[in-house]
Amino acid sequence: MKLVLLLSVFVLFLNCEDKQSKKKINPEKEITTVAKEEGLTGDEDTTDITNRAFPKLNSKNAMEFFLQYDKVHKENKVRLTTDFGTIDILLFNETKFHRSNFIFLTKQKYFNGTQFYRVIDNFMVQAGNSDDRKTSNKRTYIGKYLLPPDTKRGFKHDRGVVSMPSSDIDNPHKLASPYEFFIVQQQGGAHFLDGDYTIFGKVTSGMDVVDKIAAVETDDADWPLRNVYIRKVEIVE
């Protein structure tokens, strides 16, 4: 009798443990940087890391993920610390997927250590990429996805706006590359871009820093001869 009772308790324990292991992560929970960024800044391959705090994003799940993320994460002010000073940016609530994406990547510390890799004086400065393997590892961990354009909110590519470039792959619908962004530096704006790229924020302080970055010497591919780093991006509120 005692043996039967012990076996019953043991089976019950296994069933409870199995149910716990099958619980899904709630996409609306506060998502923080995975323990010590779990390889996000290291040189190791991050594709096999388990116990994730968020799903690996792809073209099928990204929109739903950011739709849920938007319901919880309402921050819309960020500060970029660069080699030339700080740039404060207000993210627009109207472009919620793009705002949520930027906040999410900021919380994952994706932008830290990336660069202004394309600079054209009196036009724009583009950032969010790097030739460092750490950046590639971060992207591998977070996932490969694109965001749809959201260009009918009435925003124009005026000087100081923050916009999202389209992916350079075969991309007739101009889907946005979520890891990168550009700031219009051109006096009078760059309105020929209107309707093609999603504007999702504007610089509220630090256009003098943008001008300094735009003035650096570049090679024939518009890459600065001396790397211009984003040291960190942090949420102001």
Image: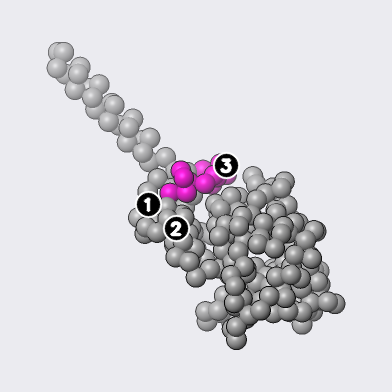
Identify which amino acid the numbered label 2 is placed on. Tyr
Do callouts 1 and 2 mark residues in contact (Cβ within 8 Å)? yes
Circle 3 or circle 1, nearest the eye: 1
Please give the name of the residue rendered at 68% of the width and 75% of the height, measured from the top-left corner: 216
Q: Is the residue marked by circle 3 packed among few (<14), some (14-19), or many (20+) residues within 10 Å?
A: few
Question: Hey, which quadrant is residue 222 in on the image?
Answer: bottom right
Please give the name of the residue rendered at 79% of the width and 65% of the height, measured from the top-left corner: 208
> Marks 3/1: CA distance?
20 Å
Horizontal side, residue 219 vs residue 237: left or right: left
Which of the two labelled residues, at mark 2 and mark 3, occupies the earlier sequence position?
Answer: 3
Q: Residue furthest right?
A: 188
Q: Which one is nearer the viewer's eye here, 194 or 228?
A: 228
Residue 98 in sight here: no
Quarter of the figure that contains the N terminus: top left
Q: Is residue 190 magenta?
A: no
- Residue 130 location in percent, x, y? 53, 68
Circle 2 or circle 3, nearest the eye: 2
Looking at the rendered structure, the secondary structure element under dot 2 is helix
Question: Hey, which quadrant is residue 88 in on the image?
Answer: bottom right
Residue on which the image places disc 1: 49
Residue on which the image places disc 2: 141
Mark identifier at residue 30: 3
Please tell me whether residue 176 is drawn above or below residue 15 in the rendered image.
below
Identify which amino acid the numbered label 3 is placed on. Glu
Please give the name of the residue rendered at 42% of the width and 40% of the height, measured from the top-left corner: 23
Residue 118 in sight here: yes
The span picked out in magenta is 26-38
